């Protein structure tokens, strides 16, 4: 086991994928064009939704979606404390106020009850996050929205492309669901994302808000062969995905479901190996198909930072997903947040770290990670987990 080195992540895109890029270079559209439209059709089919729009990141897609929903100053948007900062940052970026809620301590997901307590007359949207690849119960969340109040649900699917809850994929019960195709995601083109929706009016607005609010994108402006003036009725941002990146997606989307078992098998081996070791894992609901994007473990706050150093020394790539957003100075100071209001998120955030899980992880690479965790990290935990 000496001299082993395990990266946190290794992508599965082979050099042969350059043929897709070469094909785009033969067309006039380096930016968003016909290839992107083909990917959007694939996404509509995969998720069973009416509309999809490719974007250049989850973050820019979410800003465009909030703008398209006319959410801004004076409005509140409910977001989890346990998520990546982007989920809250997009609310700040459009000038609305993020209202943080805690998570279920076992699953790390937001629940209908936690959301219900945070709803006020200023609430305009909720952004539930399908953490690590396990979906929240969006149908149940929709049911607690007070009748007579319009509250949009935007699913943060950055981790959950191939996930299902009760046999259903994202996008069915929400107003919009947004994906990330960032470098480490299960489906990736380096940087990118997609918005899906069944709401045709919202889709029309998003089509404009991802392109400065312009009434026609580049490909559409020249469609007739003659220049046509465009207008602008609403503010937008620049969030469209170029065909140069979109061309890497079709192959991955077509094969993602058949590749999930590779990630599931790696997760299962970790789960079995850590039984009785003191290492704790998030609970997975039996109604869930988990996309196994990340594999976080909980070892408590006393051991965590020491373990990060040790794993670094042993050349194992690790990261933290996530320290609670409510522990970030920007939010803590701006909104005078108190730690005890987000106890489950902050406790998890102070004692968690994420170990490598990627579909082409070798058996011996995983064996090395397991061996180091059991031999070096598990004894650091002690009898009682410190929070
Ligand atoms: C939960 C969550 N939401 C949003 C994002 C932002 O995604 P992007 O980098 O595509 O903007 C990430 C990125 O990792 C994430 O983990």
Image: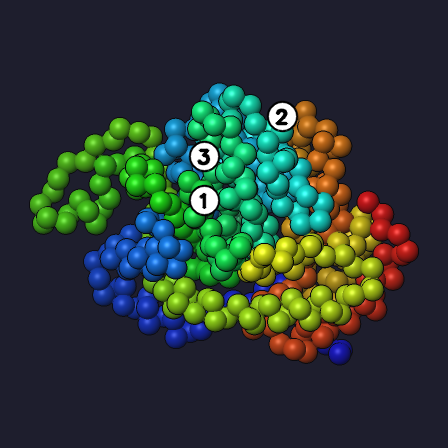
Which mark lies nearer to you, 1 or 3?
A: 1
Q: Nearer the viewer, mark 1 or mark 2?
A: 1
Q: Position of residue 230 (x, y in %)?
A: 19, 36
Rounded to the nearest angstrom, the CA distance separating label 1 from label 2 is: 33 Å
Label 3 belongs to which residue?
Answer: 152
Residue positioned 58% across, 68% down in the render: 263
Whole-percent x and y of residue 142? Answer: 50, 38
Residue identifier under label 2? 334
Residue 184 x %, y %: 53, 59
Tell me: 226 left or right of 248.
left
The image's mark for residue 173 is 1
Is disc 3 placed on a helix, strand or loop?
strand
- Classify mark 3: residues with Cα within 10 Å, few (<14), some (14-19) or many (20+): many
Tell me if residue 17 comes above or below residue 33 in the rendering.
Answer: below
Mark 1 to mark 3 CA distance (whole Å) = 10 Å
Q: Which image quarter: residue 16?
A: bottom left
The residue at the point 40 percent across, 47 percent down is 195
In this orientation, which residue lies closer to the viewer: 31 or 68?
Answer: 68
Observer-nearest of 171 and 326: 171
Is residue 305 in view?
no
Q: Quadrant of the C terminus?
A: top right
Residue 189, quarter of the rendered image: bottom left
Q: How is the image coloured?
A: rainbow
């Amino acid at each position: 086991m000496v001299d082993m080195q395990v990266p946190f992540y290794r992508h599965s895109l082979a050099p042969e994928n350059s043929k897709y890029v070469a094909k785009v270079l033969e067309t006039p559209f380096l930016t968003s064009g016909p290839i992107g439209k083909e990917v959007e059709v694939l996404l509509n089919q995969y998720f069973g939704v009416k509309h999809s729009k490719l974007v250049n990141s989850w973050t820019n897609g979410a800003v465009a979606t909030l703008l398209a929903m006319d959410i801004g100053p004076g409005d509140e948007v409910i977001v989890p404390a346990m998520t990546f900062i982007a989920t809250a940052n997009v609310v700040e970026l459009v000038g609305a106020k993020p209202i943080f809620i805690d998570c279920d301590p076992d699953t790390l997901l937001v629940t209908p009850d936690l959301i219900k307590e945070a709803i006020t007359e200023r609430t305009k949207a909720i952004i539930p996050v399908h953490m690590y690849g396990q979906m929240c119960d969006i149908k149940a969340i929709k049911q607690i929205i007070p009748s007579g109040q319009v509250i949009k649900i935007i699913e943060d699917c950055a981790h959950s492309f191939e996930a299902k809850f009760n046999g259903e994929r994202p996008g069915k019960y929400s107003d919009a669901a947004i994906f990330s195709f960032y470098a480490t995601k299960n489906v990736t083109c380096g940087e990118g994302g997609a918005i899906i929706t069944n709401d045709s009016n919202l889709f029309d607005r998003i089509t404009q808000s991802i392109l400065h609010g312009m009434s026609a994108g580049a490909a559409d402006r020249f469609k007739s062969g003659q220049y046509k003036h465009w207008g602008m009725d609403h503010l937008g941002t620049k969030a469209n995905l170029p065909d140069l990146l979109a061309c890497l997606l079709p192959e991955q989307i077509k094969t993602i479901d058949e590749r999930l078992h590779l990630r599931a098998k790696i997760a299962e081996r970790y789960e079995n190996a850590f039984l009785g070791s003191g290492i704790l894992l998030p609970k997975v609901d039996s109604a869930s198909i988990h996309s196994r994007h990340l594999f976080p473990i909980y070892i408590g706050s006393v051991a965590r930072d020491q373990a990060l150093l040790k794993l670094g020394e042993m050349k194992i790539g690790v990261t933290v997903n996530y320290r609670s957003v409510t522990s970030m100075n920007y939010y803590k100071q701006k909104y005078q947040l108190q730690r005890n209001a987000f106890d489950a998120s902050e406790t998890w955030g102070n004692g968690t770290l994420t170990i490598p899980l990627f579909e082409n992880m070798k058996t011996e690479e995983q064996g090395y990670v397991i061996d180091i965790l059991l031999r070096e990290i598990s004894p650091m935990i002690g009898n009682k987990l410190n929070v």
